[in-house]
Amino acid sequence: MLRWAVTMAEVRRGRRAAVATIGPLVERSRISLNGIPDIAWRDPYLVGFMLTLITIVARIESRNLRDHDLGVVQSQAWGAITGMDADLIGEDALTLSTSHPREFQYGCYSATLVASRLCGSAAVASIGYEPWQEAMSADERAFTGDERSMTSISNPVTGNWTDTFDAFIAALPSAKLP
């Protein structure tokens, strides 16, 4: 019973940190972009970006969080941040993390850059993340999918939220620009 309570406290701490850190950024983007289409949250780039960012923030806050408890943190935080049903992300996460499409990998890479700016490079490195353990080649970064250039989504020098998140959402065909 005590072990369960400690585990749930770690899950709660990680989820709260992720929601408190990422939620306000998403809300600011939602306002500046005149909304975020629901379909965007299931895009491989954004799934990789959000889940990696949630994971990094949660692990920095809750270092004793075990891998199998991380799925709970990810789904609960993703649901709270996006306003979507938290059950939707599980299958997407499993499918994309197994198949490794380039958009998903680039979303993960972009999240490490943003996390380094939000939490500090040392904190991100201390939990085993570095802006991308599997360095992407220039060819992979130049991937173009449904007419959106991945090179234009993120500025690798700055890792700004606007460059990695807002630019991606604004480039979606279903985006409602102000």
Image (tube, rainbow, N blue to C red):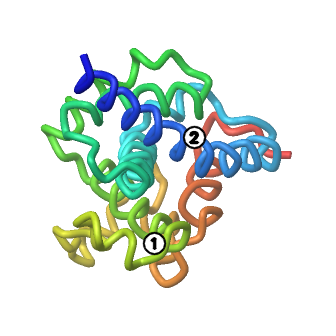
- Please name the residue that numbered disc 2 is placed on: 19
On the image, the x and y values in percent for residue 31 come to 81, 43
- The residues bearing labels 2 and 1 have C-alpha atoms spaced at a distance of 17 Å
Which residue corresponds to the image point at 74% horizontal and 41% vertical from the top-left? 30
Mark 2 or mark 1, which has the lower sequence index? 2
Q: Is residue 176 left or right of residue 49?
A: right
Q: How many marks?
A: 2
On the image, the x and y values in percent for residue 137 come to 21, 75
**Looking at the rendering, in which quadrant would you find the N terminus?**
top left
On the image, the x and y values in percent for residue 49 come to 42, 50
Which residue corresponds to the image point at 55% horizontal and 20% vertical from the top-left? 84
* Mark 1 residue type: Ser
Which residue corresponds to the image point at 36% horizontal and 48% vertical from the top-left? 55
- Badge 2 crowding class, 10 Å Cα cut-off, few under 14, some 14 to 19, many 20 or more, is many
Q: Residue furthest front?
A: 2
Q: Secondary structure at mark 2?
A: helix
On the image, the x and y values in percent for residue 4 come to 26, 22
- Please name the residue that numbered disc 1 is placed on: 116
Q: Is residue 72 left or right of residue 53?
A: left
Q: Residue furthest left?
A: 98
Which residue corresponds to the image point at 27% horizontal and 64% vertical from the top-left? 127
Q: Secondary structure at mark 1?
A: helix
